[in-house]
Amino acid sequence: MNNRRKLHLATVSIGLLPLVVVLVATGALAGCSRAVAAPGESVPELKIDMGPTLGDLTTTSALLTWHTNMPSTGWIEIRGQSVGEGGPAQTHRVRLQGLSAGQTYWYTVKAAADDQSAAAGPYRFRAPSPWLSRWSFAAYADTRSRPAMHRRVVAAMLKASPRLILCAGDLVAEGDLLHLWYQFFPVIGAFGPNVPLYPAIGNHERNAALYYELLPIPSGGGDYGTEWYTFTYGNCQFFVLDSCRRIAEQTEWLQQQLSQPRPTGVDWRIAMFHHPAFSSGAHGGNETMQQQWCPLLEDGGVDVVFCGHDHIYERSVHGGVQYVTVGTGGVSLHPVGASPNPYSRFARAALGFCRIDVTPSQLSCVFIDTNRNHYDEFTVTR
């Protein structure tokens, strides 16, 4: 697939605020709108078969993506208006701008092809307040290969009511195989339309175009302009990197980002990438991360780093930074203690996620397994 995109731009308004909607017809998944059946076969039924998935949620904007089983026009109905009609395409990407901070928005996703139509929703999301300073988010990784186990982790995670969810890579086993994304999206459908997802690319994504097309990733650098990125939510600033490739280029970018003053109201800095710098799991620690990124993270005021790759939960401490491996999103687990890690503080082979409670003065973190048992509660204070 090439990475050239066909943009369709429309401007409307929600209430008194302008709403700018960008729809993207991407690569090989774009096509004509007419559903064609082979002789003797019926025309397939139009379906919204993946998504919608919410991401890049700010005080004034949101990004939504979804996929249909055939080329279609697509739009969102929100606050009594139909906005963003465009296509034809199978992957749809809509950015809503002009939202009001702290407000809740109900929306429905719709699609049409010839005389067929489909809808998903209604769903809702809340634009965060710029003064948000007491809230919770979740982090996990390695959701690939076992959707039933992934579903158990998601069910436990949603009981923690996170405002956003981080996923540190290996969402699927082969990123360029569309049928594997059909296993992933129904599971995250429990939160995807309502709670923003922020992914980091893993080695199993293989830098496939489908990863970039199907997920609502914020703008940044690298391939498709979304391979690595930074964003601010509430009083936290996040840095998301690709630990699989282009390390030197990202090292320069990270150094530049961390050398800048923190945005107003930011109390905490958090990083995420796939390969852990320190691990006692089967893969072990990553020397490139240790040499290239750890010094920058530790000197740049980063408080916690979330990773995956090794299929365990483990917390390591180095240079005053908490390095947390959460490769526990559903994949088969690795044994603990398979590799030396002198910086390990706690490790456990169990499916689950990390819940992070944020206040202006502390980050309180805990690993929660699918039976809702709590392990390794720790706090970072200012």
Image (spheres, rainbow, N blue to C red):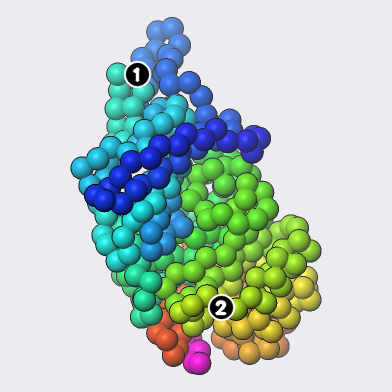
Q: Is residue 332 visible?
A: no
Which residue is the site of mark 1?
114
Residue 14 can be seen, yes or no = yes
**What separation in Å lies between label 2 and label 1 (alpha carbons)?**
50 Å
Residue type, numbered disc 1: Asp
Question: Which image quarter holds the N terminus?
Answer: top right
Q: Is residue 147 left or right of residue 176?
A: left
Q: Main secondary structure of the magenta part?
A: strand
Up/down of 224 relative to 374, above or below: above
Q: Start and end of the magenta stretch? A: 376-382
Q: Are the residues flagged by discs 2 and 1 in contact, CB closer than 8 Å? A: no
Horizontal and vertical percent position of residue 235: 44, 77
Q: Which residue is mark 2?
A: 262
Label 2: which secondary element: loop
Q: Quadrant of residue 128?
A: bottom left
Disc 2 residue crowd, few under 14, some 14–19, many 20+, Cα 10 Å: some
Spot occupied by residue 131 in the image (x, y as percentages of width and height)? 36, 76
Where is residue 177, by image quadrant? top right
